[in-house]
Amino acid sequence: MLRRRKVLGTAIALVVGCNLAEGLDFFHPAEPEGGKPCASDDDCTAFNGPCGNYTCNPTIRLCSARFSDEGTACPQGSSNGICDGKGSCVTCTEHFVSNCPTPKACTGFECVANQCAAKQAPEGFDCDKGICDGKGNCVQCTATQLQQCASMAVDCLAVSCDAANRCVNGAPNAAGKDCKDSAAMLDGICDGAGKCVKCVPGKLAKCPMNDACTTYSCEQSACVANYTPQGTGCPNGVCDGKGLCKAACKINGECASNVCSNGLCAPCTNNAQCDNGQYCNSQSGTCKPCDSQQGQCGANQYCDTGAGKCGGKKPTPADCANDYECASNHCSTSFFYCWVKKCCN
């Protein structure tokens, strides 16, 4: 910072009016302090520099300088600097840091005391390839910042960050932690040894729910069904020894299938097992009223859809739609009556 000596004030006091104003508007006292007396500009050239030219102020007869604007380029050794607006050529100023190195992903620069100072991004700050390590490097992870490793995590193996700041698989996760094995299409739990399995002893959350006729245990990492003995009571009847709770019965009529076997209702398998003109529904294994002519009653019977019963063939004459409905095996296509076929409809 340039300073004015007392002698300069004494000199200025002798000057009048606008000449004083003009001198102070455009010139600053030169170094050394107080300015050098001069008669012409030649007496001041020794003070010229890259960021200021010195001339002789004709009003006060002292060498004074006009400094280059802050940010003006100037030579500084083997590189370029900038003027600080105070006559010095420096590397940078608070407002001009263009001479500092190019910022990197995790390192920026600021100007401190006219020198470029690196400013590191904080640890965990996002960068192109991961996160900043707080030391100016863009890395995959740090010991305390593992968020970038989540997408690389392998179920049942914990992830950690190695000395090279790379995500690596670490120790196995504790047994019982939820996991998924996409290749095996398995929704399971960790076995404590780094594998995703269906169960481990004492941890059966991924096995089917127990019920009155079936309980589950874990054997060799697989859920195993254990059936309750046949005849054991269950909410809707008795267990069949195969994991199902079936209605108990003494006679066929107590079952929807009209089949009672060994004290349990069993599914029907054919129409002959059903009573009252019903047919055996193969999907449910129960006897039901017919409602269609399409295969419910069999080849030798038609369905009385009004009554929901399968019956014998219709006598002649009777309304019909198909030949199989008629005892004569002929339904007139002209009158839609069962008729004796002779020569024509």
Image: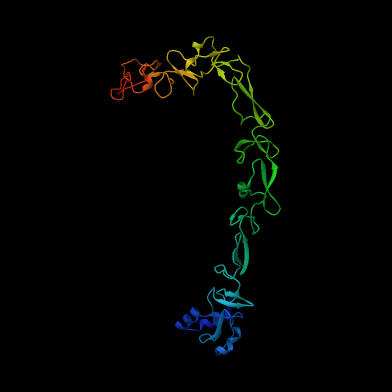
Left or right, residue 149 beside residue 12: right
Q: What is the tally of numbered marks visible in this picture?
A: 0
Q: Can residue 115 be spotted in the picture? A: yes
- Give residue 95's position: percent from left, percent from top: 54, 68
Q: In the image shown, does 301 or 170 lie closer to the viewer?
A: 301
Quarter of the figure that contains the N terminus: bottom right
Q: In the image shown, does 2 or 239 lie closer to the viewer?
A: 239
Image quadrant in which you'd find residue 120: bottom right
158 to 51, vertically: above or below: above
Quarter of the figure that contains the C terminus: top left
- Which residue is situated farthest in the top direction here? 250
At 70% from the left and 51% from the top, the residue drawn is 162
Q: Can residue 113 be spotted in the picture? A: no
246 to 123, vertically: above or below: above
Image quadrant in which you'd find residue 136: bottom right
Image quadrant in which you'd find residue 302: top left
